[in-house]
Image (cartoon, grey):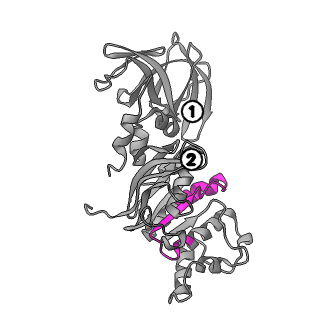
Amino acid sequence: MGHEQVILRVDDVTKQFDQPPPAVANVSLNLIQGDLLGLLGPSGCGKTTLLRLIAGFERPQSGRVEIAGKTVAGAHWIPPEQRSVGMVFQDYALFPHLTVGDNVAFGLRSSHKKRSDRVDQLIELVGLAGLEKRYPHELSGGQQQRVALARALAPEPALILLDEPLSNLDVQVRLRLREELREILKVTGISGVFVTHDQEEALAIADQVAVMRQGKIEQLGTPEEIYTHPQTRFVAEFVTRANFLPAKRRGHLWETEIGCFTARKETEQGETGDLMIREEDLILQPADSAPVIIHTRRFLGREYRYCLHTASGKRLHARTSAEVVLPVGTRVELAVAEQAIRFFPTNAVSENLVMNSVGSH
């Protein structure tokens, strides 16, 4: 593509409420036109505050925010309604006394010449054709959230902001809407930023994921980068559901209580620490004298998830394809595809890793 346009620029933004630490601390990021950015992290990490700073519901103490080439916070302050952003909240926030059609039309100026065409087009896009005359209370939660999405998209904002948009929905609806949400935004070509605490949701919807912790971005990258190359232990734990196994270096080997693994050359720093092994990268081989025992087995449809106990009482988890069926109580040796091992030193200073990925786009 080469000439990609930045639709959102957040530059060194800090927001401090009454007591320290700041809710958002020196955050910088760029979003390319047409991309979806997921802000992912545990509750209280600053992701909703960052979204509100972009929307204009909060003012930053320092730094600037630029939307579609226009400074909206920093040198100038532009209120939310003049920022060309659409908002979708987790509780839909529809007008109860207005029909679906009127809710969607609400954001359009009455002078909008093709107003009714635009409304029909959006209602169709979000899969609600035929329900224009219904009222919100006559709709399911998933349908109400679609109306909220159509209403936010109607004025063709530069940016759409979604705050945990799927968290109030039942699991089945959430999974279906997750796929559709991405498709709808891609069809309209409108860039989006959405907040979630659900790593699977972030990985499934976003083009870029910013993992936040304590007001800062720990890592920013594609879902694949975040999942396969977590740069800090926090990201590894929060996103990948990995095992962490204490290890000591002996020459070219990592020594652990379940056996030895080859140490890759580039992990020179640190002699002791934890090996990160994803659940799907553990290979189970039954062996009578092995020190690890299968404690539980769960069937998850296409795969099994095993909980293993080591001699020291540590728990490890492994996922295998549904063909690998081992009974509870089986003793197993554990092997790992070696490129799948990451090492995190005990006293890891993760700070130096954090900045590498931010804005490297």
Mark 1 and 2 residues: CB-CB less than 8 Å, in contact? Answer: no
Q: Is residue 235 left or right of residue 166?
A: left
Q: Which residue is mark 1?
A: 305
Q: Which element carries disc 1, helix, strand or loop?
A: strand
In the rendered structure, which amino acid carries the disc numbered 1?
Arg
Q: Is residue 117 above or below residue 192?
A: below
User: Between disc 1 and disc 2, whose residue precedes?
Assistant: 2
Between residue 33 and residue 182, name the one nearer to us.
33
Q: Is residue 270 left or right of residue 292?
A: left
- In the figure, residue 300 lies in which quadrant? top right
Q: Which residue is mark 2?
A: 198
Q: Which residues are magenta?
A: 152-180
As for residue 236 lying within the magenta part, the answer is no
In the rendered structure, which amino acid carries the disc numbered 2?
Asp
Task: Measuring from the top left, give residue 198's x and y in whole percent.
Answer: 56, 47
| Residue 344 shows up from this direction | yes
Q: Is residue 235 above or below residue 129?
A: above
Task: Tell me how far mark 1 sits from mark 2, CA to CA.
Answer: 20 Å
- Dot 2, how many residues are within 10 Å of its Cα: few (below 14), some (14-19), or many (20+)? some
Marks 1, 2: nearer the viewer: 2
Q: Farthest left residue?
A: 2
| Residue 126 shows up from this direction | no
As for residue 161 lying within the magenta part, the answer is yes
Q: Quadrant of the N terminus?
A: bottom left
The structure residue drawn at horizontal position 52% and vertical position 9%, both measured from the top left corner, is: 289
Q: Is residue 307 above or below residue 227?
A: above
Q: Is residue 80 above or below residue 318?
A: below
Between residue 327 and residue 255, name the one nearer to us.
255
Between residue 63 and residue 144, name the one nearer to us.
63
